């Protein structure tokens, strides 16, 4: 399921795909053998490229000491406990009234004392991971986030638990020993955290692991949601990346269908009617006809839903779940004003643009930025852009091209 058919960068322009850098097989084979089913460990020697360009020790130091990160982008954990924000943050000093900026001095003390540093939301704060996760999300059709875990030697940052999303674990530095056990709650939804099954997880942690292995630099683990796991750094500091894949499930399909059915059933004035007066509260026998009337209305509404409407709703949700590639506001405005007929333009990467036709021959571009109305005379141009991805400015029309650039839909193709 994808939220549009556009803005894919050709494989020859970006080397191996993001997924190919993580697993040794193509997407179809990975989907058949591992996706949502079972863990798989891939050794660095079996992957086509290294991973060191994505993140490393210097990346951690820059982020925590020079980027002014705030508490939501960093956590600390020690002995299975997450530390409070006030234990590692402070004010930003003169002219910076933000009170919860990460303190590198406090962080130094906690890390030296054995705390694990968790850098969250790296798909928004670290450029190489922003690009990589956006490409991976497009290939998988599911949103992707990135966190980093920096663990001192011989420490376990978090006790046994499971995640509610699939993960790719990328070992960047040091070694980490992993213990993985089968799910105690298969395929957990996003609102079913491991703490809902704490006793079962703790009981599972006492059993022998189903899988036990050591990840070394460049190795990758794929772990489906629900698998119970813990990891311990060996022989020195460990840094690993976790790429969390927030999978779309059939439950999301159900959510959209139920919402549509409720909206449709509510058109029936019988459902909008008040229940009978009852001084003793709800009467089990008396309300039975109302329950049956509502049941029949909902079943009828569900049966009338067209698959295309569900797809449209899911696409809208998917567009909102991720962001397009970054755009530089100052440079974008300057480029729009300096536009020349031979400037080559393309759809902004990962903008997920889709043309929605109107009744009068016009259309609307739906995307991850504001909806853009398209007049009938310009429809062919937008069809070509969505289909091919690139056009010269004179083929688009300079005025329309400027409008599309200022709307954040088009960017200049780099030489």
Image (spheres, rainbow, N blue to C red):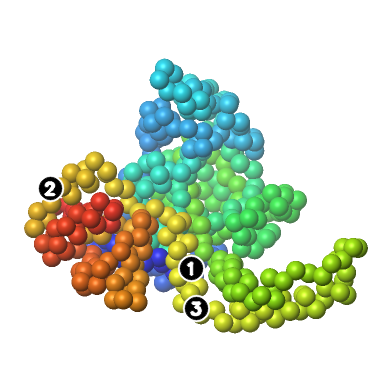
Residue identifier under label 2? 338
| Residue receiving disc 1 | 313
Residue at image point 50% right, 78% down = 307
**Residue 130 appears left or right of 302:** left
Picture quadrant of residue 126: top left
Q: Earlier in the sequence, mark 3 or mark 2?
A: 3
Under tag 2, what secondary structure? loop
User: Distance from label 2 to label 1 (Cα)?
Assistant: 38 Å
Q: Mark 2 or 1 closer to N-term?
A: 1
Marks 3/2: CA distance? 45 Å
Determine whether the residue tagged by mark 1 lies in a helix, strand or loop: helix
The x, y position of residue 239, in whole percent, is 46, 40
Q: In percent of the image, x 39 and y 53: which residue is there?
A: 323
Residue position marked by numbered label 3 in the rendering: 307
Q: Which residue is drawn at 63% across and 72% down?
A: 266
For residue 15, say whether it is visible: no
Mark 1 vs 3: CB contact within 8 A: no
């Amino acid at each position: 399921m994808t939220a549009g058919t556009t803005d894919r960068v050709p494989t020859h322009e970006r080397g191996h795909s993001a997924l190919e850098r993580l697993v040794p097989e193509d997407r179809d084979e990975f989907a058949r053998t591992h996706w949502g089913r079972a863990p798989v460990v891939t050794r660095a020697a079996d992957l086509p490229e290294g991973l060191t360009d994505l993140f490393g020790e210097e990346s951690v130091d820059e982020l925590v000491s020079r980027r002014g990160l705030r508490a939501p982008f960093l956590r600390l954990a020690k002995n299975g406990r997450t530390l409070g924000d006030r234990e590692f943050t402070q004010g930003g000093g003169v002219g910076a009234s933000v009170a919860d900026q990460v303190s590198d001095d406090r962080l130094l003390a906690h890390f030296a004392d054995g705390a694990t540093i968790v850098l969250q939301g790296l798909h928004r704060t670290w450029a190489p991971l922003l690009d990589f996760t956006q490409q991976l999300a497009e290939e998988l059709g599911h949103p992707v986030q990135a966190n980093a875990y920096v663990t001192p030697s011989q420490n376990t940052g978090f006790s046994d638990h499971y995640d509610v999303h699939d993960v790719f674990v990328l070992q960047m530095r040091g070694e980490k020993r992993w213990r993985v056990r089968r799910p105690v709650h298969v395929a957990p939804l996003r609102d079913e955290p491991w703490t809902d099954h704490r006793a079962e997880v703790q009981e599972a942690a006492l059993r022998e692991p189903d899988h036990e292995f050591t990840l070394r630099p460049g190795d990758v683990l794929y772990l489906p949601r629900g698998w119970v796991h813990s990891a311990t750094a060996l022989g020195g500091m460990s840094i690993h990346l976790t790429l969390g894949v927030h999978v779309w499930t059939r439950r999301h399909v159900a959510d959209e269908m139920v919402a549509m059915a409720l909206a449709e059933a509510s058109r029936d004035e019988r459902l909008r009617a008040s229940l009978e007066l009852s001084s003793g509260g709800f009467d089990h026998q008396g309300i039975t006809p109302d329950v049956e009337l509502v049941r029949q209305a909902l079943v009828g509404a569900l049966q009338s839903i067209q698959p295309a409407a569900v797809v449209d709703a899911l696409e809208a949700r998917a567009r909102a779940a991720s962001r397009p590639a970054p755009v530089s506001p100052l440079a974008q405005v300057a480029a729009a004003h300096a536009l020349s007929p031979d400037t080559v333009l393309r759809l902004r990467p990962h903008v997920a643009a889709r043309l929605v036709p109107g009744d009068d021959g016009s259309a609307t571009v739906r995307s991850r930025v504001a909806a853009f109305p398209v007049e009938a005379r310009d429809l062919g141009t937008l069809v070509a852009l969505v289909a091919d991805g690139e056009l010269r400015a004179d083929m688009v029309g300079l005025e329309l091209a400027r409008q599309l650039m200022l709307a954040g839909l088009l960017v200049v193709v780099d030489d």
